Amino acid sequence: DADVTQTPRNRITKTGKRIMLECSQTKGHDRMYWYRQDPGLGLRLIYYSFDVKDINKGEISDGYSVSRQAQAKFSLSLESAIPNQTALYFCATSEGRTYGYTFGSGTRLTVV
Amino acid sequence: AQKVTQAQTEISVVEKEDVTLDCVYETRDTTYYLFWYKQPPSGELVFLIRRNSFDEQNEISGRYSWNFQKSTSSFNFTITASQVVDSAVYFCALYAGGTSYGKLTFGQGTILTVHP
């Protein structure tokens, strides 16, 4: 099994629908992140969490919300999806001391 | 604030050519880490290297080499004798403290295409 698992891998949804992207990890890391990738813009941080009770907005949090259900689980929700949220989404974890990051395989989301 | 700039949006080379991907970063922190990731067409992010700000030694790994220069805030990546399998998007990233504590800041990415 992968260290960081994202589900679903691909999703097509309609404008206005609520959708949840899920991330689970077996690394035992406290820190988890959600990034969004758009062509020509690199990866941009949406939300991050340093432990279950610590959740912070990133640079592009508008239109998104997150839930840290447990140390190993960090979900990203789009309450009312819009077409410009079509992107590749990555979940990542990190261990503070070594600054090593582990990325999931990504979720390709299309909002039509 | 932290910033990473990869000025080359796309690079196209012919197999066996050497190619250098540029990365310039900005940070006020004295302790920071720099990364390179490769994203092949399959989409996953593949970690290539991590370098801390106190270690300016260049690094070579097979056909890959990295040139870290604090004086110019650059961390450039060279592929020697490129191969078709090197075709991918390459990202440079920065981890620093301060207001960006704990967060990885990415450059825009460089699309490398290696033609046979």
Image (cartoon, grey):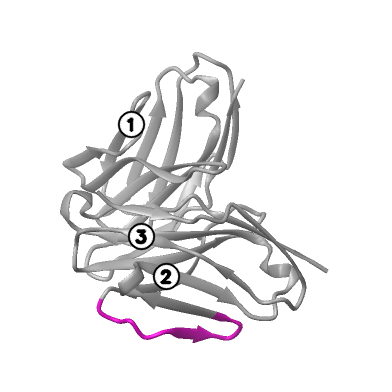
Which quadrant of the view contains residue A102? bottom left
Crowding at label 2, few (<14), some or many (≥20) Cα neighbours within 10 Å? many
Q: Main secondary structure of the magenta part?
A: loop
Write the residue at 28% across / 44% down: A48
Q: Nearer the viewer, mark 2 or mark 1?
A: 2
Q: Nearer the viewer, residue A102 or B63?
A: B63
Q: Provide the residue span drawn in magenta.
A: B54-64
Left or right of residue B61: residue B73: left
Q: Using the image, name the chain to which the residue with label 1 belongs.
A: A
Write the residue at 28% across / 40% down: A68
Q: Is residue B60 magenta?
A: yes
Is there a contact, CB below 8 Å, between mark 1 and mark 3?
A: no
Marking on residue A61: 1
**Local SS, label 2:** strand
| Amino acid type of the residue that numbered disc 1 sits on in the rendered structure | Ser
Is there a contact, CB below 8 Å, between mark 2 and mark 1?
A: no
Q: Position of residue B85 (x, y in %)?
A: 71, 69
Taking A11 as reference, is A26 above or below it? below
Q: Circle 2 sits on which residue?
A: B75
Q: Circle 3 sits on which residue?
A: B25
Which quadrant of the view contains residue B25? bottom left
Work out which quarter of the rendered image holds the C terminus of chain A and state it: top right
Mark 2 and mark 3: Cα distance apart in space? 8 Å
| Amino acid type of the residue that numbered disc 2 sits on in the rendered structure | Phe
Write the residue at 30% across / 68% down: B33
Which quadrant of the view contains residue A10? top right
**Local SS, label 1:** loop
